[in-house]
Image (spheres, helix red, strand yellow):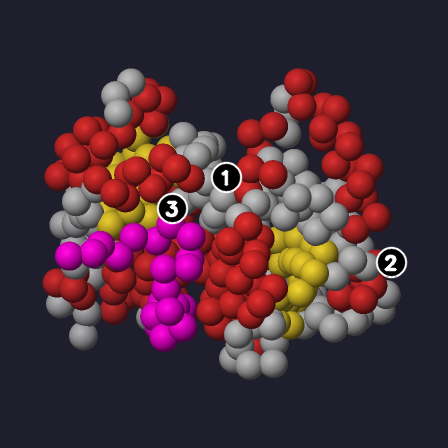
Amino acid sequence: MLLPHLLTLQELNKETLLSIIQKGIEIKRNPRAFHHAFERKGMLMLFQKTSTRTNLSFQAGIQQMGGYAVTMDWNASNFSLSPIQYEVRYASRNCDVIMARLKRHKDLLELAAYSQVAVINGCCEKYHPCQALADLMTIYEVSGTFEGVTLTYVGIHNNVANSLIAGCMTLGIQLLLVTPIVNEASWDEELMQKAYKSGVVEKVEQMADAVKRSDFIYTDTWVDMEFFHDDNYQEEKNRRLATMLPFQINQQNLRGYSPYIMHDMPVHPGFEIEEGLIESEKSIIYQQAENRMHVQKSLVLHCCPTDSLDMVK
């Protein structure tokens, strides 16, 4: 039997993706109805990268549904010493689902290939599907539909952009990409060929051309979090800042337009976004961050065996 892994967001068809989002909204509105949905079931959380939102949202969500989460530092475990296939064959016998936040997508693929339970990608260098689920849920909450919605992503073409692209293609959301710099480790040529052929993903060179068409505008950090304070990365950091500062989301670049403002956090005010816009009336940044937990609850119920839903009436 094929396990319902979630590694990129491309695994889900339109009906399934929409149902996970809608279930996330239902859980958010009526969390008590799901207090026993994951009762006595467990999630193994493997971390090779630092985390705030992924760690907190999964742990809180699992416990709110009556389950438990076991957090394991990849580098402090034998995953760093022994071939992944052997470790995950054992580890997956001790849990009902695995969430892994790793540095390399190929390691996630190996986890999924040998795991006896579903594996969820909590972020890697190529994809961040859990973030994209929260982003899409937030857009759906605000708009009530995906029909006729235009989203602009402004920033580095990275893992977040890839999963947004995958989700927008599936749901038919018009996505404008303003991405002067490509993170080479994140680039997925096959995905981008599909994206540009889909008719819903468009590369836009000038921010002004995108802003006037946008219902939502989304930005992300310009420097990968593991390098932000790395002295050896300063030259690349300075290059990125010099290139990207003209593309900051600020009042001047919005040119009088007022799309909803999104950011996946952590935020670096004065870099990718003007500080005043973070708390502005059109900012949905905190709503977007909160939705990580709600939609991930829905995702976990999707990824686990159907008997996990028996208590949800």
User: In the rendered view of the protein, which quadrant contains the C terminus?
Assistant: bottom left
Can you tell which mark lies on residue 125?
A: 1
Q: Which residue is mark 2?
A: 252
Nearer the observer: mark 1 or 2; the answer is: 1
User: In the rendered view of the protein, which quadrant contains the N terminus?
Assistant: bottom left
Q: Give the percent coordinates (x, y) of residue 117.
A: 20, 47
Can you tell which mark lies on residue 121?
A: 3
Image position of 201 with respect to 278: above or below: below
Residue 21 belongs to magenta span: yes
Is residue 52 shown to the viewer in this render?
Answer: no
- Magenta residues span 1-23
Q: CA distance from mark 3 to mark 2?
A: 37 Å
Label 3 amino acid?
A: Asn
- Dot 2 surroundings within 10 Å: few (below 14), some, or many (20 or more)? few
User: Residue visible at 47% across and 69% down?
Assistant: 170
Total numbered labels placed on residues in the image: 3
